[in-house]
Amino acid sequence: MIPKLAFGNTGHVSSRTILGAAAFGSAAQHACDRTLDCALSFGVNHVDTAANYGESELRIGDWIKRHGNPFFIGTKTAKRTRKEAAEEIQRSLERLKLPRVDLIQLHYLVDQKEWETALGPGGALEAAIEARDKGLVRFIGVTGHDVAVPTMHLKSLERFAFDSVLLPFSYVMMQNPQYAADFERLRNVCVSRNIAMQTIKSLVRRPYEPKVPHPFSTWYMPLTEQADIDAAVHWVLGHEGVFLNTAGDVSLIPKVLDAASRFTSPPDDATMRALVEKLEMKPLFV
């Protein structure tokens, strides 16, 4: 079983590995059902999705309609204005077949102009707060990609008391000195303020080459062998207090969950360096 940890200051004790439902965006319902059942068998009690993850919310809602909801559900809005975000939050509730979600996250909030809109007057943050006040959501988070995201999250936390952050974290990504330093600054703030820290892109092997077929629904070439996935997952879980969101392909999720269930200690630096060299790993964001 996958261990659990307090999800920041929310009062919820989440599995340290969170089911990343980006994998459900273009997957058939039966594949999503099988994945949700698999996650439950490993003790996963937290699902992360988004309004713009294709059919993901619908797939989860269909399962919930038949089985009830045993999960802490987080979704996201990429809208930047109050009106558009409010409409999207309502649509997410309808698609998920839920009267409320546990966590609404402002999605991919990295661009400076979008940040000013979303967190300014009439912005998406106001819609999230209003939804929380109405009991439609319980908590509010912020997410992002790119090298700049730790710095932008720190800026967001100075503007508003978000309950969670989400950003990339992997051995190969942390070889970027600037990203590593900014990530640790953010992590220290999250620890001091009891803010949940979700991490993504743990299985990045390298970006896809242009015009090369993509055999997985991830938007990068992922690690696929169990031993390699074990190393990547165990490296992330070796960092106290962080959560790991599973990869964006249903065929990879059971391997990630299996790896997480067997975590005891992280691989050493020499092991990870050897893996990077063997597989010619490269960061997704530079």
Image (spheres, rainbow, N blue to C red):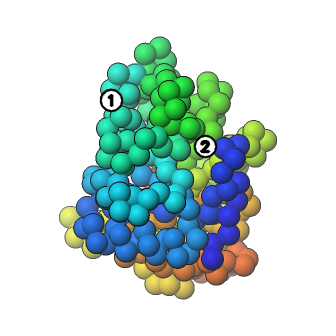
On the picture, is 46 further left or further right than 64?
A: right
On the picture, is 51 further left or further right than 283?
A: left
> Could you say whether the residue bearing mark 1 is in a helix, strand or loop?
helix
Q: In this view, does 250 lie above or below 111?
A: below
List the residue tagged with mark 2: 164
* Residue at 25% in and 67% down: 28
Picture quadrant where residue 253 is located? bottom left
Of the pair 260 and 207, the residue shown nearer to us: 260
Q: Is any part of residue 76 visible from this angle?
A: no
Where's residue 160, x and y in %?
62, 27
Q: Is any part of residue 86 visible from this angle?
A: yes
On the picture, is 144 further left or further right than 56?
A: right
* Residue at 60% in and 43% down: 164
Q: Is residue 193 above or below residue 85?
A: below
Q: Nearer the viewer, mark 1 or mark 2?
A: 1
* Residue at 20% in and 64% down: 211
* Residue at 53% in and 44% down: 102
> Could you say whether the residue bearing mark 2 is in a helix, strand or loop?
strand
> Alpha carbon of mark 1 to alpha carbon of mark 2: how far?
22 Å
Where's residue 154, x and y in %?
63, 35
On the picture, is 240 further left or further right than 35?
A: right
List the residue tagged with mark 1: 87
Contact (CB < 8 A) between labels 1 and 2?
no
Where's residue 96, x and y in %?
36, 49
Q: Identify the image quadrant of the N terminus.
A: bottom right
For mark 1, does the 10 Å Cα neighbourhood hold few (<14), some (14 to 19), or many (20 or more) residues?
few
Amino acid of disc 2: Ser
